[in-house]
Amino acid sequence: MDTNSEINKAGDRSLEGVSSLIKDKSADLHGAIDKASDLTRPAVERAVNGAHAGVDQVSTALSDATATLAERTRELTAAYQRYAETGRRYVRTSPVLSISVALAAGYLFSKLFSSRDR
């Protein structure tokens, strides 16, 4: 036999052994990855479920706050309109008294907020 052919055959056997070893180790690594995935899946699912629940709670709270704010805005607008109409009616029925009250209030405010240096 030729020395080169023996070397080639030995090299081929070595390559087959290395190839077989690589396949075996690759299968082992895939198994380890699958095992790690199986072990972490419950924790990831709990975290995802908790995150979804938290988002739902925040969304519900914001929706409730928005509804409450809208209701309060309607109430304040209605109260403002009632007071404005009451004021208009008062001025229409008692214009002289209304002007006198406005002048007195203006005078009091000017005394309260004017500087005392003068």
Image: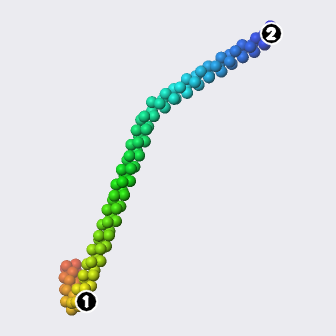
Q: Residues within 10 Å of mark 1 (few under 14, many from 20)?
A: few
Q: Quadrant of the C terminus?
A: bottom left
- At horizontal 52% and vertical 29% (from top left) the residue drawn is 33
Circle 2: residue type: Asp
Q: Residue 47's quadrant in the figure?
A: top left
Q: Residue 79's quadrant in the figure?
A: bottom left
Query: In this rendering, would 53 be left or right of 37?
Result: left
Image vertical order of residue 45 relative to residue 93, above or below: above
Image vertical order of residue 79 relative to residue 40, above or below: below
Residue 20 x %, y %: 64, 19
Query: In this rendering, would 82 be left or right of 8?
Result: left
Circle 1: residue type: Arg
Front residue of 62/100: it is 62
Residue 63 x %, y %: 36, 58
Image vertical order of residue 25 relative to residue 47, above or below: above
The residue labelled by disc 1 is 92
Residue 98 x %, y %: 22, 88
- At horizontal 21% and vertical 81% (from top left) the residue drawn is 109
Among numbered discs 1 and 2, the one appearing first in the sequence: 2
The residue labelled by disc 2 is 2
- At horizontal 27% and vertical 81% (from top left) the residue drawn is 85
- At horizontal 28% and vertical 75% (from top left) the residue drawn is 80
The kind of secondary structure element at disc 2 is loop
Q: Residues within 10 Å of mark 2 (few under 14, many from 20)?
A: few
Residue 99 visible at all: no
Q: Are marks 1 and 2 in contact (CB under 8 Å)?
A: no
Front residue of 19/61: it is 61
